[in-house]
Amino acid sequence: MVFVLLATTGWTAVRQQNGPVETRAAALTAWKQAVIGHRALPDPESPPGVLARFFSSLEAGQAASLADRHPLVVGNLNGAPVTLRYRANRIALAQERQVEQWRASDGRLSAAGRGEASRRVHRYESLLRPGRQILAFDPTGKGRVAEVFGDLDRARRVSVIVPGVDTDVLTFERSKRRYSAPVGMAQSLYTAERAAAPAVRTAVIAWADYTSPSGVGLDASTGRLAAGGADRLVALTGALPGRSEVSLFCHSYGSVVCGVAARELPRRVRDMAVAGSPGMRAENAAGLGTDARVWAMRDAGDWIKDVPYLKVGGLGHGADPVAPGFGARVLSAAGALGHTGYFEPGTESLSNFAEIGVGSYRTVSCEDGNSGCRRGIYGAEVS
């Protein structure tokens, strides 16, 4: 019955997840066989603190040499200095661009294969533009990537955008429907945060560093991919530099990822705001097992409201986060206009996100028009 409901509300598979060979696997093998001086290199899966201590023990030239020799590893190490990761990922992107340029002109590939290679070349060239800060990059499969806006090392407040289905290296940014893609979302939020609190040092991460479902099919109706994404999100938030407070902004299936991650998130994650959520794999906010404040919003015209809010036999994601019984702080999404408009400039949804991101809770707009969603927060208005 659940499967039929999911299918009839548009949750149907649209394509297979295929892509290039796993070049990162070869990079990891090379890393494990390498040394620096007479020292073996640490396990890439080591805790961030272990990796941070390793890199702090290196001379600047040694660290740069590792980034140059092993860019696909160093660029994705939680615990490595962020500026070193930026350097490594520029090298990795340049190398992968060269590979895709060759594939785009290889007559042995199908027209579709050459077309995808050409699109990757275009994307990598965009990501290589001066000033871009690529925090993570992996070309495997459909590709994963994350980008930072602002100074992550000096930020007092860090916002992480966790996007939903069909997020990969090719959809990381868009020229049309710009604010429906992670880069546009992050740029919009960073601009809004700077306007809301110019004196607060902020940074925003467009985080597409997990494997998301392709289309709204079976994968989108289960928590399988969300579990993998949750592990990566926990690792990211635990490895951010300094003592910044962190807010998560989770859109659509990204809210499933955040819900699964909630119990393991570090205490520095103070706020979790979901928009257009199909559920968070919990029956209420308390069931998430987090000390973070849980916020939720949904535009009246968002099609996600028609998805069955239930979980049976592994299908579905549980209760509706904007329902009164869930216990989230429900925000206004006025102006969002549908499922992908929450980060559009000029909307109350974006304004609310920005106020949460800078910690200005007094000025968020509640869905009920009163101050109920601000109740109990220190310094916020109460009714």
Image: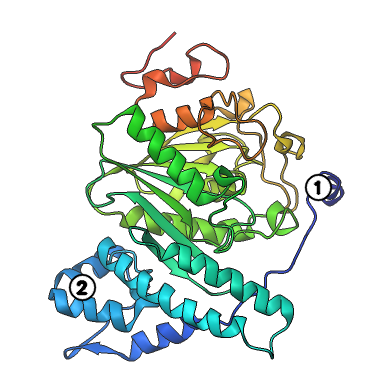
Mark 2, residues whose alpha carbon is within 10 Å: few (<14), some, or many (≥20)? some
Judge whether 52 appears above or below 355 on screen: below
| Horizontal side, residue 19 vs residue 16: left or right | left
The residue sitting at 76% across, 39% down in the picture is 308
Q: Check disc 1 and give the amino acid type.
A: Gly
- Is residue 261 visible in the rendered image? The answer is no
Residue 358 x, y percent position in the rendering: 34, 32
Q: Quadrant of residue 37?
A: bottom left
Q: Secondary structure at mark 2?
A: helix
Write down the residue under mark 2: 54
The residue sitting at 33% across, 34% down in the picture is 194
Residue 10 x, y percent position in the rendering: 81, 47
**Considering depth in this image, is 21 or 277 the residue closer to the camera?**
21
The residue sitting at 41% across, 66% down in the picture is 128
* Quadrant occupied by the C terminus: top left
Judge whether 120 appears above or below 293 on screen: below
Circle number at residue 10: 1
The residue sitting at 41% across, 56% down in the picture is 147
Judge whether 70 appears above or below 331 on screen: below
Q: Quadrant of residue 90?
A: bottom left
